[in-house]
Amino acid sequence: MSGAPFAVGVFNVPNLRWLPVWQRNFLVWKKLAIPSLLGNLADPMLYMLGLGYGLGRLLPDVAGVPYLNFLAAGTIAYSVMNSATFETLYSAFSRMHVQKTWEAILNTPLGLTDVLLGEWLWATSKSLLSGLAILVVIWGLGLQADFLMSLGLVPVIVLTGLCFAGLGLAINAISPNYDFFLYYFTLAITPMVLLGGVFYPTSELPLWLKAAADWLPLTHAVQLARPLVLGQWPQDILWHSCVLAAYGLAGFWAACRLTRRRLLR
Amino acid sequence: MPVALSLKDLHKRYGAAEVVAGLNLELVAGTCHGLLGPNGAGKTTTLRLALGLIEADAGQIALLGHALPQEASTARARVGVVPQADSLDPDFTVRENLMVFGRYFGLSRRAIEARLPMLLEFAGLAGKAEAKIGALSGGMKRRLTLARALVNDPDVIFLDEPTTGLDPQARHLIWQGLRKLTGQGKTLLLTTHFMEEAERLCDRISIIDRGRVIAEGAPRELIQHHVEPGVVEIYGEDIEAWCDRLAERYCRRCEKVGETLFCYTAEPQALIAALDGMPHLRYLHRPANLEDVFLKLTGRDLRD
């Protein structure tokens, strides 16, 4: 058997070269699918139900709806962000740095862009699953105002996943070790969770802080997701989508540059 | 003779250090070619250049008729690599490692499955297809890495220190595998620190130091050309004094390393007779080997 491998399968479509990398991660995930899904679900569920019911009892309606309903969209955005971030930081770092999986792949016809594209889309897929899991809970509890409109959350989840997976890969590229990720969590992820409108409308913030929050990608994800849960079309759909896409693309571009410098020089 | 890999006047600089400094190499198809050199001589950088993973500052690279790095992807489809560091997928079984790796070459599931029994057999892992990587010994892992490099039925195989860290038994099994591959007409490029390994396996050897080839030839030729046919190694308490008084009288060239004196000579009889009269010195008379060539050409100082 010495035929040219390029003649077969997915490589006929040059832009599907990332697929074997995605498939590799999927195969690993499949082995641990149940605990992985539970892990994705448990944390955001506890936030949503604990705060939603516990704190919600003490609060008047927020933005015209019970607090639990208000919190639902924020939980989706937060959960998708977390899932994409963890996958591109800890898991991708293991593959790149500890297991040398990427280096092994680079010895095959695949290039670094194929590897990173596979990782980017894989992390997005995983975060889609996390987002969908929360969405199913929302449906189960009947928190959505309009079922059809809540389906609009699916593209929002994908876009949010692409955004944070791209950013995460860029951070991964410059990280010397696992401890480095704490900076990213402390300086980027935690401020986004607390200021991005997950738990309260950003309009409650003082003006200077709201202005800062408007720069955070999670703020834009929440502003797309919340109206869709509450049965309204989001305002400025194009603007919010463009900001998320811009962060994601900039992150992915930086990841390609920085990882090349790290592994292939 | 068709050339599988040709490197012409290759240069690669990292900051102030020129790691590859005008390196030339021709890898003849169907042969095993050894790259020997002390740590930091530029072996691994040369391999990475030859795979099109990094770009040279100057020079030309042709791998299986493809200009690198422009056509690296096409060329690598016909190449297998056994890297220095273990990069098997710990989340997978032996079988899954091979299946997943085959997909990176665009091979269909059926094509890889058809090769699977042969690959497992080659690696001596026929009964271990479902074993987890963590359950394999060091030797098994290396053999699996070698089998993984064959998943695409490559014409050329790059091996970066394939037996480092293995025990002698495991090393012999790898050697057996490599000889089988040359028997099948595969082309091998091998880096190693084991001179015995290079002497046994390689048709040709390039000794590299400071980024360029300082000697090249068949192992026998290199030994004949660069060192005297016999070596007497002498060790014992009085070696310093003996060295000063007598060494030059009995041998053409001698070098002291640690507590051992290496005397290179074509006529050892007189030296051995003299040594027999000095019971406090122990000695070993042996034919010269590749290690003597290597140490003569690259020096005896420690490289870190």
Image (tube, rainbow, N blue to C red):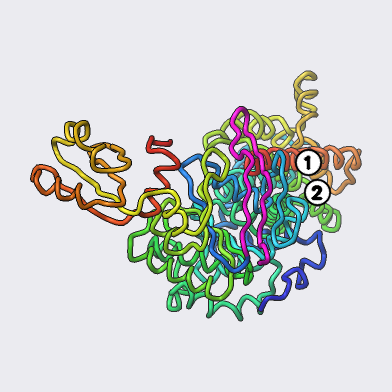
* Residue at image point 48% right, 50% down: B36
Q: Which mark is residue A221?
A: 1
Percent x, y for residue A186?
60, 30
Q: From what the image shows, is residue A183 above or below residue A33?
A: above
Q: From what the image shows, is residue B81 above or below residue A258?
A: below
For the image, the number of numbered tags is 2
* Residue at image point 51% right, 41% down: B209
Chain at numbered mark 2: A
Q: Secondary structure at mark 1?
A: helix
Which residue is more in the foreground, B51 or A124?
B51
Q: Is residue B77 left or right of residue A229?
A: left
Q: Name the residue type under label 2.
A: Val
Determine crowd level at label 1: few under 14, some 14-19, many 20+ residues with C-alpha closer than 10 A: many
Q: Name the residue type under label 1.
A: Ala
Percent x, y for residue B99?
60, 70
Considering only order in the chain, which callout, 1 or 2, is on the residue closer to the N terminus? 2
Percent x, y for residue B75?
71, 60
Residue bearing the label numbered 2: A156
* Quadrant in which the N terminus of chain A is drawn: bottom right
Which residue is more in the foreground, B1 or A68?
B1
